[in-house]
């Protein structure tokens, strides 16, 4: 990102004495190896060839990259091996994405976790190998940087608010003024423990998908799950795939429901992380809830049209390009007019986005891969979007 012009969505609210970072994220970084362009998965005893392959940092790096590309000052606390995989991930995040790694550590003789992701028919299958980090997150991070916010996944086995070694760092950050934005992963045990929801009194926002939200709240619809969660946390958001997303901000008294954009989704990897980063940007910037929801939906829609986790996270240049295209399109039908109405708030934002703002192929690990090339760029951004075919 150092060679690109950074658009700062929080510029109007920054003051002397502000926290040193906008968001601190902590978790496991994986080396993601992504195979694309398969007609079908191989049958037993057979081999298939993929049309494309990309490599990039994954896991918690998806959140970090998504936030950094949207202009937030981002710091990451994660363990890295001293192997080539770890070196690749470290270099990509620090040098190409501009993420602060001062609270991360390299560990000798520790194998960097690896995930192989195969995208087939708009869905994905993954194989992962890894080991527990050599230190607890709290011991590794040490002094937590002063941050406006923290992004993390809740876990029944590592609860917030109870002094767990893996969570004390987050509690310290909250004590220093950081707002905790939480998500949750799939529960392979099928228990969906209510202990997860007990942690929401430590959080400012909770952003699960509909399946997770309904399972944890024991409800039968995304809206019912939303209302249950809104009693537990100030900002409750439930994403629902092709059906869009719903949210309640109890602090502002706003409620919003937005449809998904009509796009061809080719790889959903990391789409939830991109949505969360969009909500974080809009919330920190003080946007109305409806604008935050539409912006987050746009970011995730741009991501699912590309292959691969952090490779696909859009930057402000991608958002500006999209809006300029939409504004030029004829409004001959209700769907087109609806999109222009929904995203009219982008007019003022995009007007301030510099021509050289980061695009996903400009400050991306895709430059080191042969993931699917993007559509032919317009002349004004050609120099910024070179990608190995």
Image (cartoon, grey):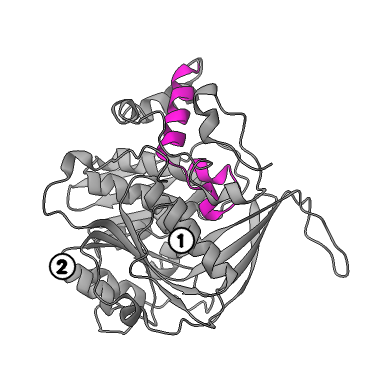
Cα–Cα gap, marks 1 and 2: 24 Å
Give the quarter of the figure containing the C terminus.
Answer: top right
Q: Classify residue 39 as left or right of residue 138.
A: right
Q: Is residue 35 visible?
A: yes
Residue 319 located within the stretch drawn in magenta: yes
The residue identified by callout 2 is 176
Residue depicted at 35% across the width and 40% down the height: 6
Residue sitting nearer the eye, 234 or 374: 374
Residue sitting nearer the eye, 5 or 329: 5
Residue sitting nearer the eye, 367 or 344: 367
Q: Classify residue 254 as left or right of residue 219.
A: left
Q: Classify residue 315 as left or right of residue 33.
A: left
Relative image position of residue 158 (x, y in whole percent): 36, 81
Residue depicted at 32% across the width and 82% down the height: 139
**Vertical relation: 345 (above or below) 215:** above
Q: Which residues are magenta?
A: 301-329
**Vertical relation: 119 (above or below) 60:** above
Residue sitting nearer the eye, 256 or 137: 137
- Which residue occupies the extreme right position in the image? 45
User: Main SS of the magenta segment?
Assistant: helix
Q: How many marks?
A: 2
Q: Label 2 crowding class (10 Å Cα cut-off): few <14, some 14-19, many 20+?
A: some
SS label for mark 2: loop
Relative image position of residue 323 (x, y in whole percent): 43, 27
Name which of mark 1 and mark 2 comes first in the sequence: 1
Q: Is residue 210 visible?
A: no
The residue identified by callout 1 is 61
SS label for mark 1: helix
- Which residue occupies the extreme left position in the image? 16
Residue depicted at 30% across the width and 31% down the height: 349
Which numbered circle lies on residue 85?
none
């Amino acid at each position: 990102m150092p060679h690109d012009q950074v658009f700062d969505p929080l510029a109007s609210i920054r003051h002397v004495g502000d926290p040193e970072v906008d968001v601190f994220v902590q978790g496991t970084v994986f080396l993601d190896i992504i195979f694309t362009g398969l007609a079908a998965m191989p049958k037993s005893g057979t081999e298939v060839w993929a049309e494309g392959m990309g490599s990039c940092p994954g896991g918690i790096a998806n959140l970090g990259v998504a936030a950094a590309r949207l202009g937030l000052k981002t710091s990451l606390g994660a363990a890295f091996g001293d192997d080539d995989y770890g070196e690749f991930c470290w270099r990509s995040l620090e040098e190409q994405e501009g993420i602060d790694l001062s609270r991360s550590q390299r560990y000798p003789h520790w194998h960097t976790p690896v995930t192989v992701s195969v995208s087939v028919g708009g869905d994905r299958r993954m194989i992962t190998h890894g080991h527990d980090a050599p230190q607890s997150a709290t011991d590794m991070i040490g002094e937590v940087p002063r941050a406006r916010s923290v992004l993390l996944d809740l876990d029944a086995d590592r609860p917030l608010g109870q002094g767990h070694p893996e969570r004390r760092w987050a509690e310290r950050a909250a004590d220093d003024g950081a707002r905790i934005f939480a998500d949750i992963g799939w529960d392979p045990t099928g228990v969906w423990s209510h202990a997860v929801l007990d942690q929401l009194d430590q959080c400012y926002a909770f952003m699960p998908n509909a399946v997770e939200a309904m399972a944890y709240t024991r409800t039968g619809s995304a809206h019912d799950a939303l209302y249950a969660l809104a009693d537990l946390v100030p900002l409750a958001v439930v994403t629902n795939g092709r059906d869009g997303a719903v949210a309640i901000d109890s602090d502002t008294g706003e409620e919003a429901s937005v449809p998904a954009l009509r796009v061809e989704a080719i790889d959903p990897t990391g789409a939830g992380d991109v949505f969360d980063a969009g909500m974080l940007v809009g919330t920190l910037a003080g946007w109305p809830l409806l604008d935050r929801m539409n912006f987050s939906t746009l970011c995730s829609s741009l991501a699912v049209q590309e292959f691969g986790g952090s490779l696909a996270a859009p930057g402000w240049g991608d958002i500006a390009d999209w809006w300029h295209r939409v504004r030029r399109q004829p409004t001959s039908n209700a769907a087109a007019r609806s999109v222009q109405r929904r995203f009219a708030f982008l007019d003022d934002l995009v007007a301030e986005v510099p021509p050289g703002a980061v695009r996903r192929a400009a400050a991306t690990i895709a430059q080191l891969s042969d993931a699917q090339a993007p559509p032919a760029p317009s002349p004004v951004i050609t120099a910024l979007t070179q990608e190995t075919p």
